[in-house]
Amino acid sequence: MNRKKPELLMPAGSPELLRTVIAYGADAVYLGDETMSLRAKAKNFNIFEIRDGIAYAHDHGVKVYVAANIFAHNEDLRKALRLFLQMKDAKPDGLIISDPGVFTIAKSICPDIPVHISTQANSTNYATFLFWHDQGVKRVVAARELSVMELMEIRQQIPEDMEIECFVHGAMCISYSGRCLISNYLTGRDANRGECTHPCRWSYQLVEEKRPGQYMPVFEDERGTYLYHSKDLCMIEHLDELITAGADSLKVEGRMKNALYAATVARAYRRAIDEWYEAPEIYKDNRASYLEEVKKCSNRGFTTGFYFGRPDESAQVYDTSAGMGEYEYLGTIHPEDGWYGFIQKNKFCVGDTVEVIRPDGSTLTAQVKALYNEAKEPVADVPHASSKCYVDLGTELFDYDIMRTAHTQEEE
């Protein structure tokens, strides 16, 4: 296989999720600090957590990229200056930036830390890639509006040492490369500064200007319609085409997702990439199984976005904002002196059958033999979310084993 193995780049919305995606096969993770990230509602990282996260990742051979990709207003430039002074010491493997002013500050303070140009910067042609290369940039995150054929042409026109990063999985923003004004207009919270309220998920009805108070359902649906509600991107059945086109890094969206989502998606894409690299025929034979696995975590249905042409109405979800998913997250195991502790996420009971997904790629089905509260007293069930509990499944468990249970629908 002549083509180099692409990087699997996973989101980390918290220190615990950073460790989770590393356990489940990420080659690199991206995270945000508390001031300059486009995911203000994620838990995010303070500077001490960033330093610890980088050290932990590097100990496991994994890279860390720090997102500072807001579009800055004047008052944000002081935050950028402070952040990059901290990053100079923390030494992440890359800084994800979209704003030219923020880029200039980063290069002046951290000249030795590579800059990755964010998808927010709308890089849609090879001339733009070449512009950034002239500025010393070695990686650009391709705009999500690009097709596979356009990516291939960009790859042919840019230097070999320049990397293309592509989104392969996760939520799709309805606005161009994620540059959205709807949240700011409706709520005063600016999506381009990390405070999006996700109005693309809201239900809408039509009002004619001269008929105030008369709400006319779009498409004659009495519930209204979710006009802007896109299905999630999923390219797990088409990784071979993206890699052949020239993608160096395959990026998953989801810094606000839970550990079950992060682990399930990382494990599926890790297996898909490894099997493609081992032999493309193995990957092609197993594509349906990869898809079945990612369907088991939270999703809104799947689309291939713009990669094979402009999306039509089939890429939208008009009748609900609810997510789908076949499994519910119960907790992540962390062994303690022979006890299998976890922070409980959803209720389950003694006698229930659960699945355990594991970083090694295996899946265990087991019955809950016993449950214990934080005081290690036996209980019949664990009904209180976020409480510390212990479980006995009648078998040995390992760090970062994740328990899940089958159900019909999942909403985050």
Image (cartoon, rainbow, N blue to C red):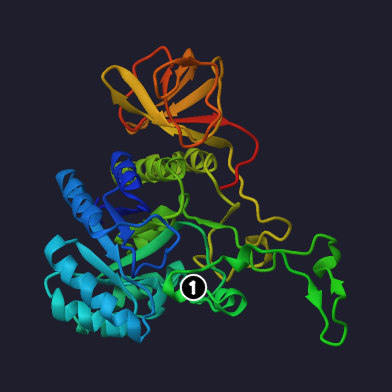
Residue under pointer 1: 191
Q: Nearer the viewer, residue 172 or 189?
A: 189
Q: Measuring from the top left, give residue 55's x and y in whole percent.
A: 16, 50
In the picture, residue 154 is in which quadrant?
A: bottom left
Q: Measuring from the top left, give residue 370's x and y in whole percent.
A: 47, 14
Q: Residue at x 34, y 16 (%)?
A: 396
Examine the rendering and report whether any part of residue 6 can be seen: no
Badge 1 crowding class, 10 Å Cα cut-off, few under 14, some 14 to 19, many 20 or more, is: many
The answer to whether 13 appears left or right of 57 in the picture is: right
How many circles with numbers are drawn on the protein? 1
Q: Residue at x 21, y 81 (%)?
A: 105
Q: Residue at x 48, y 50 (%)?
A: 237
In this view, 3 is above or below 103: above
In this view, 394 is above or below 48: above
The answer to whether 14 appears left or right of 51 in the picture is: right
Q: Measuring from the top left, give residue 223's x and y in whole percent.
A: 80, 60
Badge 1 marks a residue whose secondary structure is helix
In the picture, residue 24 is in which quadrant?
A: top left
Q: Amino acid at mark 1?
A: Ala
Examine the rendering and report whether any part of residue 68 can be seen: yes
In this view, 290 is above or below 221: above
In the picture, residue 374 is in which quadrant?
A: top left
